[in-house]
Amino acid sequence: MSFIPSLFILLTLVSFIFSQQQEKPWQEFVSEEGNFAVLMPGTPLPQPPIDSGGIEVHNYTYSQKELGYLISYNILPSKLLKQVSTKETLDFTIRGLLGRANGKLISSSDIKLENYPGKKVKIEGNNLFFYGQIFVVKQRVYYVMLLSKTDPSNLKESETFLSSFKLVSIPADDENLPKQELTLNKLYSEAGNFSVDIPGKPQQAAIPTTTIDNLKLELRTFATTTSSTVYVASYFDLPKENLLKNRPKELFDYFRNSIATTNNSKLIEESELKLEKHPGRFFKFKKDNGATITSKIYLVNQRLYLISVTSTDSQEAKPELTDKFLSSFQLLGRDFDDPFEDNTPLIGGVVKDKDNKETSNADTSMGSTEDPTLKTNPTEKTKDLSKGVLRGNAIEKPSPEYPIDAKQQRIEGDVVVRIVIDKDGKVPRAKIISGAMVFHDAAIKTAKAWRFNPSLLDGKPVRVVGDLTFRFKLP
C-alpha cells in the first residue's frame, strides 16, 4: 500500500526542468484549501488534483536555482485509516516514495507538526535527491519536499522552507467538512482585457512556455481546481514583430496537436469559432482513462487566449458548469494589436497622427507613485520639443489598492505600466511591462485613472507615451 501521488515524479520534474523562475524575495504562500502556509522563493503552481485509487491528491510545485519545491497533501478515506495505524501510514508512505524514486533511504528521523507525527527523510535515487518532511494530520498526509541533483540538506534555503511549514487552523476530518456547492464568480482581468465566469476563487500564475517557431513566452493563467476538475483561463502576447497573428490556422493546429500529445489524448470534436470578429477554435479531447479536455482558443491580434476545462478522471466535468464557463468569456473593451496601436509608439518612437504625420519623438519616463516625474530625451529630429511636449505634470495621481491575495501572502514589488496619454491628458490605454502578476490588475486600473495636463507641440495638444512605476510595499 502506498500513499505517494502517482504523478509525483512527473509533475515535479516537469516543473523542475521547464519552469525555472527568476529569483524573488521569499514570501509566505497560504493555501486555504490545503490548510497550510509555508515560506517560498515564489508562488508555486497548483497542479490538477488527482484521484489515485480513492485517495485525493493535491500538488503545488515551484523551482529555482536547480532546486525543486513540492508541497503535496493526500486526503485518505476514513475507512482506510481505520485499518492502519499512524506509524504504518508513515511507513507505507516512505516505502511508496522509495519505490517511485527507485532510490535508497539515506536518513529518517521522527518529527512533529504541532502534535501530529511525521518523518524527516532523505532519499537518493534516479540521479536526484529527495529531502523533506512527511506528516499525518487526521485524514491528510502532507509532503513538504525538496528535489535537487545534489544533496540539498545543507542548503540554507532548505531549512527556511521546511521549518516554515505550518497548519493555518485546527484541522477537521475531511469527511465532516461541509460540502460547498460550486458556484461561478465573475473574474475581471484588466491586464488581460477579459472577463469570465469561473468556479471558486482562481489562483494566478505566470508560467514560462515555448510555442510555435520556438518562441519563449510567458503564459499568464487563472486556475481553479476541484476534486476532479481544473478550470483555466490563460493568455500570452506574441512579440509585436512576429507574424503569427497572420497565421491563425497554423497556430491553432499547433495547439491542437500539442494538447493531444502532452496529455496523451485523442481529438473527438473540433470546430471553428469567432470572438466578436476574431478567429478561434473549439477542441474536445478524451484520454485513455475517460478524462476529457474541453478548450476554446482565440487569437485577438497579438494576444492568444486559451480557456479550458479538464476532468481528471473518467467522470466528465459538469456539462452545465463547463458550458457556462467557456461561453462567458468576453473581451472587456476595445481590442487592439498592442495598447499603443494607431501608430502611437513605444518609448523612443515617433508619435504619429492617424494621417501618419509626425507630431513628437521623445523618451518619456515617469517614476514611482511617490515621486512621479516627466523628463525628455529627444532625438535629433525633435530636440526643440524637449521643453514642451512631455513635461505635462500629473494632476490626478491615485494610488493603487493593495490586492488582498498579495497582502495575505506578504508579496511586495514594483510594477511598471506603459501608458498612452491622449490629447486631453487622459490615459485610454495601458499595458504591463514588468512586475508580479498579482499586482497587474490593480496597477492597470490605477494607471488609467491618472490625469495629466495636456502636452503641447506648437501650441497644439498631442499624444505621448511613458512609463508609470507603482511600488507595492507592506507597512
Image (tube, grey):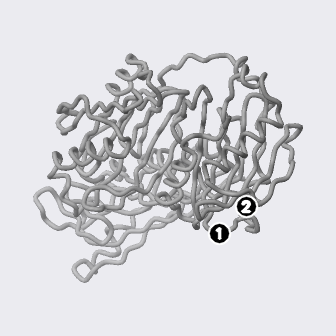
Q: Is residue 129 above or below residue 260?
A: below
Number of the label disc, if any, that sits on residue 158: 2
**Proximity of marks 2 and 1: CB atoms separated by less than 8 Å:** no
N-terminal of the pair, mark 2 or mark 1, is 1
Residue shown at 78% from the left, 43% from the top = 166
Q: Amino acid at mark 1?
A: Thr
Question: Between residues 387 and 300, which one lies in front from this camera angle?
Answer: 300
Count neighbours of disc 2 (C-alpha within 10 A) and say few if under 14, some if 14 to 19, many if 20 or more: some
Quarter occupied by the N terminus? top right
Question: Between residues 281 and 240, which one lies in front from this camera angle?
Answer: 281
Q: Is residue 409 visible?
A: no
Q: Is residue 417 above or below residue 226?
A: below
* Element at label 2: helix
Q: Which residue is mark 1?
A: 150
Number of the label disc, if any, that sits on residue 441: none
Which residue in the rendered view is the most extreme toward the bottom? 380
Instruction: Give the mark toward the camera: 2 or 1.
Output: 1
Count neighbours of disc 1 (C-alpha within 10 A) and say few if under 14, some if 14 to 19, many if 20 or more: few
User: Is 8 on the left or on the right of 337, as rendered?
Assistant: right
Q: Distance between the Cα atoms at labels 2 and 1?
A: 12 Å
Residue 134, image x and y in percent? 75, 45
Residue 456, image x and y in percent? 29, 64
Residue shown at 61% from the left, 62% from the top = 128
Picture quadrant where residue 309 is located: top left
Which residue in the rendered view is the most extreme toward the right? 115
User: Is 457 on the left or on the right of 393, as rendered?
Assistant: left
